[in-house]
């Protein structure tokens, strides 16, 4: 079977598209898919060039680990070639530091767009930035060898790549606080029980289980999926009455569309 040519293949990120399904792959298994600013920019670019025909994005990592987190070279005085080191950023202005972190976050936020569903297929280590990248997706299928850990606080930092909001939403404040402050490992059984993962399977079945989930996701009518995702995403910011109103409006749009009645 011929694989589609990549639309993007740079800085540890490869994007391929097969009709309604896109696959974003982290491609530095020799580094356990450790992350860098260049990788985050490549993720942002993958989101920018994603064709409008795509309904589901699968995010995966090559090798034994999904992503072992931030490449520690970021904390050395020299940093990465052509990049300001994190030490240099810390010495700069507040505005530049804020804008730089916001740029890094862009690689994660597009996975939550309401017009797509995103699925992380996670094996082995998903540490720090790797954990947050998995949390950026709507759904997570994990191998039974998965090890989630939020290591930032243990290193004197905080999780800043958009992971705190979904973590609290999934497991609650108290458990999220404990997970972040202790930096402990979360294995497959706990990940499923706590809501961090939708399903756990033996490592050799990860790809097949992900494909089965994706097939089920694309089976539903796209417009209904988009409306449903938007409804669920907005729950935390609405009262019950506001949510009821949003449901009525969404259902009205669906009924008119099904009846062939335009706006």
Image (spheres, rainbow, N blue to C red):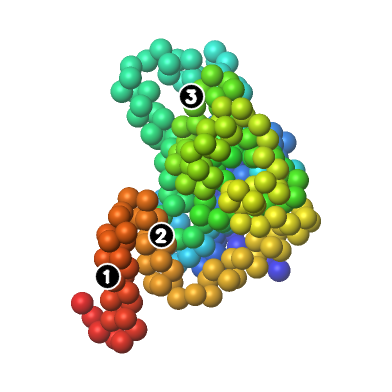
Give the CA distance from mark 2 to mark 3.
39 Å
The residue drawn where x is 54% and y is 45% is 171
Task: Residue at 29% x, 71% y: name it.
Answer: 248
Figure quadrant of residue 206: bottom right
Q: Position of residue 257 (x, y in %)?
A: 31, 80
Disc 1 marks which residue?
249
Sequence-wise first label, 2 or 3: 3
Could you say which is closer to the camera, residue 257 or residue 86?
A: 257
Give the quarter of the image for residue 253: bottom left
Instruction: Count the labels in the image.
Output: 3
Identify the secondary structure beneath mark 1: helix
Mark 3 lies on a secondary structure that is: loop
Question: Which of disc 1 and disc 3 is earlier in sequence?
Answer: 3
Q: Are marks 2 and 3 in contact (CB under 8 Å)?
A: no
Residue that appears at 70% across and 55% down: 200
Graded by Cα atoms within 10 Å as few (under 14), some (14 to 19) or many (20 or more), the crowding at tag 2 reads few
Q: Are marks 3 and 1 in contact (CB under 8 Å)?
A: no
Task: Give residue 232's mark.
Answer: 2
Question: Foreground: 3 or 99?
Answer: 99
Q: Residue 18: x, y in percent?
A: 56, 66
Work out whether residue 222 or residue 202 is closer to the camera in this orientation and state it.
Answer: 202
Judge from the rendering whether residue 156 lies leftward or rightward of residue 261; answer left or right. Answer: right
| Element on which disc 2 rests | helix
Residue 49 seen in this snapshot: no
Of the numbered discs in the image, which one, if any, rests on residue 83?
A: 3
């Amino acid at each position: 079977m011929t694989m589609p040519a990549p639309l993007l293949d740079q800085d540890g990120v490869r994007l391929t598209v097969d009709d309604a399904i896109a696959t974003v792959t982290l491609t530095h298994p020799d580094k356990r898919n450790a992350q860098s600013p260049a990788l985050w920019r490549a993720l942002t670019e993958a989101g920018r060039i994603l064709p409008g025909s795509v309904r589901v994005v699968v995010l995966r990592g090559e090798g034994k680990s999904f992503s072992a987190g931030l490449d520690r070279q970021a904390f050395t005085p020299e940093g990465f070639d052509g990049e300001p080191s994190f030490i240099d950023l810390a010495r700069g202005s507040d505005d530049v530091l804020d804008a730089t972190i916001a740029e890094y976050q862009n690689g994660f936020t597009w996975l939550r767009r309401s017009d797509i569903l995103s699925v992380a297929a996670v094996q082995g280590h998903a540490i720090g930035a790797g954990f947050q990248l998995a949390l950026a997706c709507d759904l997570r299928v994990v191998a039974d060898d998965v090890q989630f850990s939020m290591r930032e606080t243990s290193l004197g930092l905080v999780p800043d790549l958009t992971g705190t909001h979904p973590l609290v939403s999934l497991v609650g404040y108290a458990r999220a606080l404990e997970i972040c402050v202790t930096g402990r490992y979360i294995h497959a059984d706990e990940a499923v029980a706590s809501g961090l993962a939708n399903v756990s399977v033996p490592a050799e079945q990860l790809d097949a289980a992900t494909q089965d989930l994706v097939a089920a996701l694309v089976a539903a009518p796209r417009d209904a999926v988009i409306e449903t995702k938007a409804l669920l995403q907005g729950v935390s910011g609405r009262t019950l009455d506001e949510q009821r109103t949003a449901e009525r409006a969404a259902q009205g749009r669906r009924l008119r569309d099904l009846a062939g009645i335009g706006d």
